Structure formats: C-alpha cells, structure tokens
Image (cartoon, grey):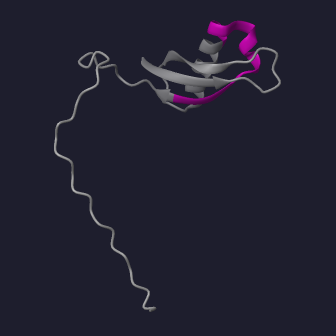
C-alpha cells in the first residue's frame, strides 16, 4: 500500500470549520475515484460526523522520509555561478 496525503476544507458557512491534511493508505492510483474514496472514508473515520460536509481538495503521494538529514540543513560551499548578462535588443530608434 502507498501512503498518500489528502488536503481537506470545510464549506465557508459550516458549523464546524475544518482545514488541514491527513495521511492515508491506498492501493489505487493517485487522483483516481478509488483513491478519493479511500481518502473520504479515512477522513470520516478520523473526524466523524463533522466531516460529512467537508471536501477533499487534493491528494498527493507522501514523500519518503530521509533519516540521513535528521532535521538538519546542509550547507553548500560550492562557488557561486556567474550570472549571465541579459541581452538587450535595440529597437532601431535613436
């Protein structure tokens, strides 16, 4: 099973407002009807009856977590690239 990340949003006039995201697992392709159905079921399991009127905005594949960085940023000591000068066109007017 692949892990996906679903972003949801409640209607503007809803009694219980909700905006956020959650993880879920699915065998279906990203963006397919089965994948959206799995996301909807997981959302209802997590948030209950409040989530009935909420809609799922987008579903994206969860990126693999890398343990090598462990939350630390890496420094880049490579020399800077030379910036190329932009070519200006002459319009022929003086």
Depth order, front residue of 20/45: 20
Q: Position of residue 47 (x, y in %)?
A: 67, 9
Q: Is residue 47 left or right of residue 2?
A: right
| Of residues 42 and 71, the one drawn nearer to the viewer in this rendering | 71
Asked if residue 73 is positioned above or below residue 24 in the image, the reply reads: below
Question: If the image is split into quadrants, where does the C terminus sit?
Answer: bottom left
Q: Is 86 one of the magenta-colored residues?
A: no
Task: Decide: is 30 above or below 67.
Answer: below
The image quarter in which residue 43 lies: top right
Residue at left offset 51%, top offset 16% = 23
The span shown in magenta is 44-59
Q: Position of residue 51 (x, y in %)?
A: 71, 15
Magenta region's main secondary structure? Answer: helix
Q: Could you say which quadrant of the image residue 44 lies in?
A: top right
- Residue 18 position in % (x across, y down): 69, 18
**Residue sitting at x 82%, y 15%:** 15
């Amino acid at each position: 099973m692949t892990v996906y990340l679903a972003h949801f949003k409640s209607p503007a006039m809803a009694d219980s407002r909700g905006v956020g995201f959650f993880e879920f697992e699915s065998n279906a392709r990203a963006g397919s009807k089965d994948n959206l159905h799995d996301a909807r079921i997981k959302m209802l399991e997590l948030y209950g009856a409040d989530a009935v009127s909420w809609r799922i905005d987008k579903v994206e594949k969860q990126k693999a977590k890398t343990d090598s960085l462990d939350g630390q940023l890496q420094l880049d000591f490579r020399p800077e690239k030379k910036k190329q000068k932009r070519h200006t066109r002459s319009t022929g007017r003086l």
